[in-house]
Amino acid sequence: MTPLESTLAAVAPADEQAMTAARELQDRLTKPAGSLGALEELSVRLAGLAGVCPPPLPEPAAIAVFAGDHGVHATGVTPWPQEVTAQMVANFVAGGAVVNALARQMGASIMVVDVGVGIPLHGGDTLLDANIRRGTRNLAVEPAMTQAEAEAALEVGISVAAALVEGGAKCLVTGDMGIANTTPAAALIAAFTGATPAAVTGRGTGIDDDTYARKVDVVTQALDLHRPDPAQPLATLAAVGGLEHAALAGFILGAAARRVPVVVDGVIAASAALVAAAFAPDAVAAMVAGHRSAEPGATVALDHLGLTPLLDLGMRLGEGSGAVLALPIVSGAVRVLREVSTFDTAGVTEK
């Protein structure tokens, strides 16, 4: 089997017995039943993923920032020059980006992965050169990738997830960088959810009205040209996706195959999560929605996946910045199950 095939074969449903045990334990803890709201359901989902109650602590966490460039940049969907992708990768490696600061706050490690940056990059201890090609083709006029390229990028993500878990990570976090990458994200979300391009296309890095209208038109043109079939996830990904989107989808699948939670960031990661779910619906059991991005497509994607974001801060940066902020909540959900006394053990009278 190929790495993709073996990963898909390893993705399994959530363990119902462990989830039942987690719900029953929540009801016996020294608190009113249901008083922790969404934290309780998160703990149940994490128990189902791990197959044991209580689940292991999701610490330490590791962030993987996948970077790539996009041929659709030529259509004018963003005012930012394409070389900013490579410049920001250098910033990540140097530790100067927002996600670096937040990762230090949360005690999370960062790996930066060049899966499709247009400019050759120089190495660093935290930079992995896994470049498939120097940016995608223009999805508005031809498929962004061949299916072989898309599969190769998926397998980059799978291998990164495996390396981080084998290195001791108990929780993975999605990160991304790529100028113009919200355009393929919108196309993927529309393709997999059936939503209209206008409903899923946002303003990305902050574009004006004319550029936004052009962006919606480009997404519409790409969907009309390729007619992507959501039942064919590899073909859809190759037609309208990006190299970092593909790698993120593989990263999510790799986490699910190893039954490790993966905290999904904003609209790029949400579009990749749709791809992962199309390949393996049970992969959703490993996904935790870190935050609600201000990009409209993110909410459409999360709703389609049945995921409720833990935070809503109006963020739209990417990089993994919103997801990393959710890490204490994910850990807190597990600590409640592991450390809070039951009514019996604490000698507290129930109502």
Image (cartoon, grey):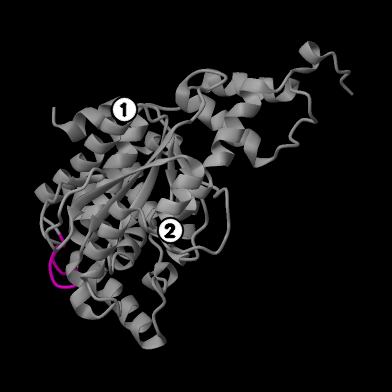
Q: Is residue 343 above or below residue 123?
A: above
Q: Is residue 56 left or right of residue 254?
A: right
Residue 178 image label: none
User: Residue at position x 61%, y 18% from top?
Assistant: 21
Name the residue type under label 2.
Answer: Val
| Residue 134 lies in the magenta-colored region | no
| Residue 139 lies in the magenta-colored region | yes
Report the magenta residues as a range.
136-144
Q: Nearer the viewer, residue 275 or 60?
A: 60
Residue 339 at x, y percent in the picture: 66, 22
Q: Is residue 271 left or right of residue 315?
A: left
Residue 167 image label: 1
Query: Dot 1: few (<14), some (14–19), or many (≥20) neighbours within 10 Å?
Result: few
Residue 57 at x, y percent in the picture: 51, 26
**Residue 112 shows in the view:** yes
Counting labels gives: 2
Q: Secondary structure at mark 1?
A: loop
The residue beneath circle 2 is 98
User: Residue at position x 46%, y 27% from top?
Assistant: 49
How far separated are the C-alphas under marks 1 and 2?
24 Å
Which comes sooner in the sequence, label 1 or label 2? Answer: 2
Pointer 1 and pointer 2: residues touching (CB < 8 Å)?
A: no
Name the residue type under label 1.
Answer: Gly
Query: Dot 2: few (<14), some (14–19), or many (≥20) neighbours within 10 Å?
Result: some
Q: Quadrant of residue 173?
A: top left
User: Residue at position x 39%, y 27% from top?
Assistant: 259
User: Residue at position x 26%, y 69% from top?
Assistant: 84
Q: Secondary structure at mark 2?
A: helix
Residue 38 at x, y percent in the picture: 64, 41
